[in-house]
Image (cartoon, grey):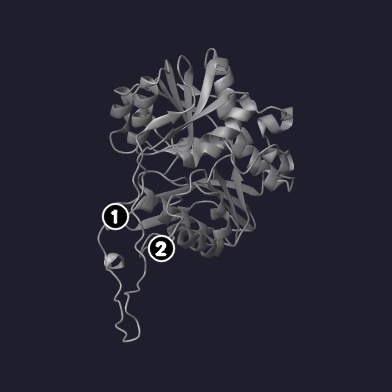
Amino acid sequence: MLLNKTRLVGLSNRSRNCNMDGNSTSDIVILSGNSHPELADLIANRLGVRKGGCSVYHKTNRETIVEIADSIRGKNIYIIQTGTKDVNNNIMELLIMAYACKTSSASSIVGVIPYLPYSKQCKMRKRGCIVSKLLAQMMCKSGLSHIITMDLHQKEIQGFFDCPVDNLRASPFLLQYIQESIPDYRNSVIVARNPGSAKKATSYAERLRLAIAVIHGEQKEAESDEVDGRYSPPCIPRSRTMDVSVGVPAHPAKEKPPINVVGDVGGRIAIMVDDMIDDVQSFVAAAEVLKECGAYKIYVLATHGLLSSDAPRLIEDSPIDEVVVTNTVPHELQKMQCNKIKTIDISILISEAIRRIHNKESMSYLFKNVTLED
């Protein structure tokens, strides 16, 4: 069941409905790829505009073809395309759609990407590369002049783009869900499943006036330590003037401490918060630890519900009572496989951002009281 949260505290009636003025709908065009047409329909309905005619399909050789049916010369284009499990096709569809609009003389092209693909690959890893920077450059080169996204994995990713980026936050919707849908939420504790997410947990706890707990010692999701050339010991030069061998000191290996919970969760509701749920094994392991420590109910809240692999089965068999995510990523199939997954509709936030950008209004209200930890 889609939890359609249609109020954002403080929005006026006009912005709540997000309808455009009659004379401003003629130069706005909403296009969508194949990643999340349901979200595109919700956004178009809230804006009171009709989706533009755009066909995106694949030939027999798997090349992506984009055909725009309507004239978009001089129009303001908003392309709604999110990241799903078919991530590489999603990216190519977005790039080709943006370039097609650019070569068709569109006035402006805004990419609405609720979940930015490859956002977890935003740091240098051994002989790898920062893939999110490469993707940002490709998007800008394709013709996108503005990006609307939500809850980037790392806020610094905005600096990879050569165009403005509005990184919206889903935290008001998740906080509202806690207050309205979790009975006795005052007896809750906000849990960070690892020390890295402690800042986000602290931000939620301060807004709800709740305590926090941190799970320490959980195995991180870092890549395995494979043997490569970097682990070869350095060559120690021979010198007749040195009697003692001098070389580069070895970096001591990490030893993870036993998993424990820093904070009191006994007899309370544990609410884990994060930006995305992809591989759920770490969440299931954390839930088992919380259950052993006395938590009588366990919730997991996140913005992006990727829910890869056999996530629905693992959630169904785990101590987790409920997993709450937004509809930035389609997950209807996973919901059919697991009754514990709930969805919050954030189309009102995205449509309000589009309305403000199109009418050249300030975006500051959407970031009111937003901190870097959110």
Q: Which residue is mark 2?
A: 129
Residue 132: percent from the left, percent from the top? Answer: 46, 57
Residue 365: percent from the left, percent from the top? Answer: 72, 39
Q: Which mark is residue 299?
A: none
Q: Which residue is mark 1?
A: 225
Q: Dot 1: within a 10 Å radius of its alpha carbon, few (fewer than 14), some, or many (20 or more) residues?
A: few
Helix, strand or loop status at disc 1: loop
Helix, strand or loop status at disc 2: loop
In the orientation shown, which residue stands out farthest toward the left? 227
On the rendered structure, is 8 left or right of 3? right
Closer-to-camera residue (81/171): 171
74 shown above or below 338 = below
**Quadrant where the C terminus lies?**
top right
Query: What's the amino acid at mark 1?
Result: Asp
| Residue drawn at the location 29% of the way across and 28% of the way down | 314
Query: What's the amino acid at mark 2?
Result: Cys
Closer-to-camera residue (132/228): 228
